[in-house]
Amino acid sequence: MFLLGRRRFRYRGAIGCLAACTALALVIGACGDDGGDDTAAGGGTSSTSAPTGSPIKIGNVGLYSGAFGAQNQRGVDALVAWSKWVNAHGGINGHPVEVIVKDDQGDPTKSIAAVRELVEQEKVIALVGNFAGATDGAWRDYAEEKQIPVIGGITTTAQYGESPMFFAASANSLGYLTGELYGAKLAGASKVGMVVCAEQAACAEANGLISQVSASVGIESAGVQTAAAAAPNYISQCIAMRNSGVDAVVTNVPAQVTERLIKDCSTQRYEPIYIFSGGVFQENLIRPESEGSWVVSGAPLWFGDEPYLNDFRAALEQYTDNEPDGFASRGWQAGLLFAAAAKNVSAKPTSAEILEGLYALSGQPLGEWSPPLSFTRGEPNSVGACNWYAQIVDGKLTTPKGYDPICIEE
């Protein structure tokens, strides 16, 4: 069923039984105020005096170089901008926030080494906004052993929904896949195909889930096509989907690959409805061939003049050279989740205090920045299949479903 505001509807079927194993490319009280003031968006105080408490150190690990680095960098830039915005408005409970970033280059060995350095040498109390979709499994056991909370960022990996130390305000892999297929249903499609990256083995894991999830959502699936960023063209993928009768294509590949895919499919006189991943969506994907297509975002929509975006946009403008996008939205959201958990920290903040703050958030949203959260001590954490939707109409992004997430439940 549909409800006003944060709308929810139910599908009965296999969703609750599936393992969240795909890695698809991705403040309480005052936060509930929609007025867009400093506290609501930044998680600090309304004061403009400099914070005088001891610094709160948080770590960040991700792939910030190579083919996927640029898109992930926009996310961590937004997290750093959030910390600077918070510090300019009084900090968190009087503490300034320090973000220490490590580029793991997509290497699991380098990633675990970076996490150990952050925890054991830098003394961070949480890992926040990590864009480590290919490597976070390498240090899951370490985070659990050390009781270090891992908060937000790319949440479409197996750890979110399986580990009690991984906390998200966005859907995990299963929830996001479900939301993408629902996007195809919103588009009026009868049969959906998916294109995923060829560089990471985890991307192809969607193939094992898509048929089950599509059946629950009520749309036929033609399975998964892989696409390598270095491939000369994607004509074979286009022809395969066209011949299979696919009328909606979900693209879980970088924007530059998606752009070439659209062009190649057009040369084959194949112009399906596209379902774009919000995290990698770029303005150059708005073109005549994509008219009517949908964008499914795992974090709040980043465009428009809604009050909840005011501080987010102002901070990006002041502290980065980046325009708002889906990756930036994820980075900012991660900062908000940490701030909500840290709002009552002591003079010497600890990881244990952050964990207690996270558990206290259950049943509450981060204002406009999340659906209601559900964190239980000792159990895997998930917000369910809650996603945000936009559509390309007349050459621009529109919000026919509004700015609130739509949540799909069993």
Image (spheres, rainbow, N blue to C red):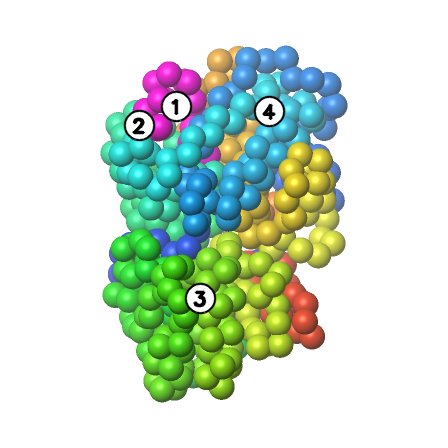
Q: Which residue is mark 4?
A: 92
Q: Amino acid at mark 4?
A: Ile
Gap between marks 3 and 4, in whole Å? 38 Å
Residue 19 picture quarter: bottom left
Using the rendered image of the protein, determine whether residue 204 is visible from the camera's viewpoint: yes
Q: Position of residue 313 (x, y in %)?
A: 69, 44
Residues under numbered marks 3 and 4 in contact, where contact means CB atoms less than 8 Å apart: no
Residues under numbered marks 1 and 4 in contact, where contact means CB atoms less than 8 Å apart: no
- Choose between 317 and 128: the one closer to the eye: 317
Image height check: is 172 above or below 64? below
Gap between marks 3 and 2, in whole Å? 32 Å
Q: Which residue is mark 3?
A: 251
Going from N to C along the chain, the mark reached first, 3 or 4, is: 4
Q: Which residue is mark 1?
A: 118
The range drawn in magenta is 114-128
- Choose between 14 and 363: the one closer to the eye: 14
Disc number lying in front (2 or 1): 2
Going from N to C along the chain, the mark reached first, 3 or 2, is: 2
Q: Position of residue 350 (x, y in %)?
A: 43, 19
